[in-house]
Image: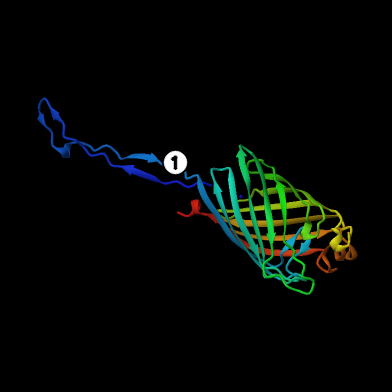
Amino acid sequence: MIKATGFAFGTLVSAAAIVSAAGVASAADLAAPEAAIIEAAPSPIDVAFGVKFTTDYVFRGVTQSKGDPAVQGYAELQAYNWVYAGIWASSVNGFATDPASEVDLYAGIRHTWDAFTIDVGGLYYYYPGEDGPSRFELDYWEIYAKPSYAFGDLGSITGNVYWTSDFVNTGADATYLSAIAKVNIPVDVLQDTSFYVSGELGKQWIGKTSAKYGRVQLEDYLTWNVGIGATYKAATVEFRYSDSDLSKTECAVNNGARWVCGDRYMLSLSFDTAFSKLK
C-alpha cells in the first residue's frame, strides 16, 4: 500500500546549393536530408497522484471509517529515481476524537535495481480537527522498510516492516511485519486491461501504554486480506476481503470499540497517474 518524462524535438537542416563541375544544380533536383531527431534526457523530477473511492477504509484489519465509504487521495513528488515525499489523505469516521480526516505525510528513499526495489522512509499520521471529551490526540509517527522483488510479468512479492515508539500516541512500542504477494492473471480479453490477485499476511505487535494511559498491555494480533482486481489504463477496480484474529474483547482493548474489527469486504475504484504519463 509507486517515472520520468521526456520529449523529443527536431532540428531542421536546410539544403545547401551544390555546385558541380558541369554547372549549378537547381535546389529542386536535390533531396533534403531528413530532420535529425534528438532525444531529450528524461526529467529527473515527476509527480504521481491519484484518488480512490472505497466502500470501507480498513487499516491492518481495523475499519477507520465505521464501515462506511471513504474518499482518499494522494500526491507524491519523486526525484532522480531515489528520493520521494508525499501526502495521502482519507475521510474517516467512528473515532472518539472525531477528526475531520486522516492526513499522512511521508518521505523516503526508493530505488530499483533490475527486479529488486528497496524503499525506506518515515511517515506521520495526522488527524486534524480532533475534539471530544477525552482530549486525546491520535497523531503519531512510524518508520518503515519495504523491499520488493518483481518476477517479470508474473507478479511480485513485497515485505513490510513498520516501527514506532508511540503507537497512536499512547506511548506503546509497536511493530508491524507483513508479506504481500501479487500474481498477474494471464488473460487478454480486453485491450489495455490487466487482471491480478493479491494477498497480505501481517502481524501487529504492540507493547504497554505509558503511565498516562494506565500502562495497559495492548493486544498483538494477526491480520490478513486477499483481493482481485482489474486495471484499465489509469483506472483500477478491486474487491478485497480483510480479517484478523482479534476477539471482540481484544478489539475493544486496542481500539475502544468491539465492532471495528472482524471480517470486512471492500469494493473500490481508483485512478492513478503521473505528470510523465500525461501526453
Q: Is residue 1 visible?
A: no
Q: Secondary structure at mark 1?
A: loop
Percent of width and height locating residue 163: 76, 50
Determine whether 88 is above or below 162 in the image.
below
Q: What residue is drawn where x is 11% and y is 25%?
A: 21
- Please identify the residue farthest to the front as the structure is shown: 212
- Please identify the residue farthest to the bottom as the structure is shown: 133
* Image quadrant in which the N terminus is located: bottom right
Q: Is residue 85 visible?
A: yes
Percent of width and height locating residue 39: 41, 40
Determine whether 150 is above or below 194 in the image.
above
Q: Nearer the viewer, residue 170 or 273?
A: 170
- Please identify the residue farthest to the left as the structure is shown: 23
Residue identified by numbered label 1: 41
The image quadrant of residue 90 is bottom right
Q: What residue is drawn where x is 49% and y is 51%?
A: 276
Q: What residue is drawn where x is 78% and y is 57%?
A: 167
Residue type (three-letter) at the residue carrying disc 1: Ala
Percent of width and height locating residue 30: 19, 36
Determine whether 154 is above or below 96 in the image.
above
- Asked whether, in this view, residue 125 is left or right of residue 38, the answer is right
The image quadrant of residue 19 is top left
Determine whether 200 is above or below 54 in the image.
above
- Asked whether, in this view, residue 171 is left or right of residue 116, the answer is right
The image quadrant of residue 234 is bottom right
